[in-house]
Image (tube, rainbow, N blue to C red):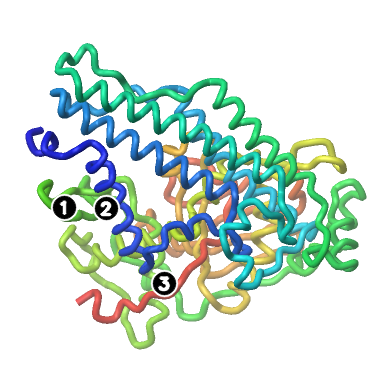
Amino acid sequence: MQVVRLIDPYLGAALVLGVLWLGFRIGTGSWRFWKIAVGVDGRYSSSRFQGLVWSIVVLFSYVAMFVARAHAGSVEPIRAIPPNVLVALGLSLGTTAAAAGITSSRVSRQVEVKSQPGAEARGFAALVEDDNGRPDLAKAQLLAWAFVTLAVYVVATTDAVSRTLATTDLSLIPGLPDIDTTLLVLSGIGQGSYLANKAAATPTGPNSASPAATALATAVQPAPGHAAMAAVMAPSLRPGSARVVGFTPSVNGFQFTNSFPPEPTMTIDLPVVGRVPIGDASNGVCGGMVCAARDIFETPGMAPISNPTQPGPNDPLFRYIVKRLIASFELPRVGFLKYYEWMLTPDGDTGWPPFVVRRGLAWKTIVEEWPNRIRPELDAGRLCCLGLVTTASPNPADLGHNHQVMAYGYDLDAEQTLTLLISDPNTSPANADRVRISVSLANPEQVTQITHNVGIDHPIRGFFMVDYTYEDPTGQLA
């Protein structure tokens, strides 16, 4: 506590953000953390940007208040997070996930075609402009109310820090400031207007869908019935099989399972504070094991790891798995938010077709992911990393209930039953070659049961391909 008292509250908060920035640099190779706000089309996304700023400000306020309370004699964590702060964080992240879902749905149905902009379109002006470079009132309103609310909250934090430093009576120490309800409502209206405008927008100009794309989008609407949809999906429903040549889970997977004892996944050394543990391996490192196993398999001449003993925290293999775990989060593009978006999505389609349709996880899995991303990879003889969404929850803490596996083949029969062959880091080598995920592709608009024998305790609600970038493990595992 004496060490903490030597640190100014604002300096302490800045140091924590600096450490996170350094971690971002180590994990991504870039200092430009603001690129998290860049969407898949290469433009700055208003929803991502405001979510990023909200996260930074609340984290800064929390740390500043914690250090100020330490000056007053209390190093207890601030357990009472004000309700409006939680709501504001939920709204900002929810808006980001919902906006991504709307864009993904429109693009997948070819209602909207996203083009890659030129360099001049990649500046921050895109935060208040539409795709054609025109001022966008909904975006401007979203950011205006967000920044007004944030500015008021920063002032409230400054006042709380000052009052905390001025007292030594623990009973008089204020808690983390709350957000004014009126401002929260106005900020929420701004976010709601932004999402409504995004959902109702009609593409024009250079990003408009072509006549062929428009016709296709009309064909896949649910109103005409299954015939039109089946015609569009015919290529993905064609019976067939594929295997990644040479890959066998019991041989090419790890000979130990994803069940590590409680120990930090990594540690960092900080001035004054010393070594700080981060993460807990007992919560699982499935993404790291999947990516590492694929790296080893795709490295020419490299033999599978045959050691049946789980590596310890100082083992090069464990460090490599943790490195690949961090890479699987896709931090620069906030890829982990796709899990959160799917956690907020119903299992089947909802709304009032054909006027308003919110696609469910069955549609996203069967119509968006399987034909466009997963089947092409397996047909090409490549392994495919999969994210399994297992829970329906608005609580970000439940993200850890989801799981990652790797598909190495499939069988699709004439009845449109798809069976994926899976390498699962939770399954022992003795049973590794028998892991399967099966789903019917017949009715993507409806709730569709997914059967499996993956080593998890939850049902699988949907799955998607996780973007993978090869990392050469040669020399890193010695």
Residue type indicated by callout 2: Val
Q: Residue at x 32, y 83 (%)?
A: 302
Given this view, does label 3 or label 2 mark the residue nearer the observer?
Answer: 2
Could you tell whether 233 is left or right of 65 in the image?
right
Measured in 3D between alpha carbons, the distance from the residue under mark 1 to the one under mark 2, in whole angstroms, is 8 Å
Residue under label 1, please give it: 270
Q: Are marks 1 and 3 in contact (CB under 8 Å)?
A: no
Residue 387: x %, y % from top left? 51, 55
How many dots with numbers? 3
Residue under label 2, please give it: 19
> From the viewer's perspective, is residue 219 above or below residue 170?
below
Residue under label 3, please give it: 294
Q: Are marks 1 and 2 in contact (CB under 8 Å)?
A: yes
Given this view, does label 1 or label 3 mark the residue nearer the observer?
Answer: 1
Q: Residue at x 38, y 72 (%)?
A: 252
Measured in 3D between alpha carbons, the distance from the residue under mark 3 to the one under mark 2, in whole angstroms, is 30 Å
- Of the two numbered discs 1 and 3 on the same chain, state the one appearing first in sequence: 1
Residue 118: x %, y % from top left? 64, 72
Q: Quadrant of the N terminus?
A: top left
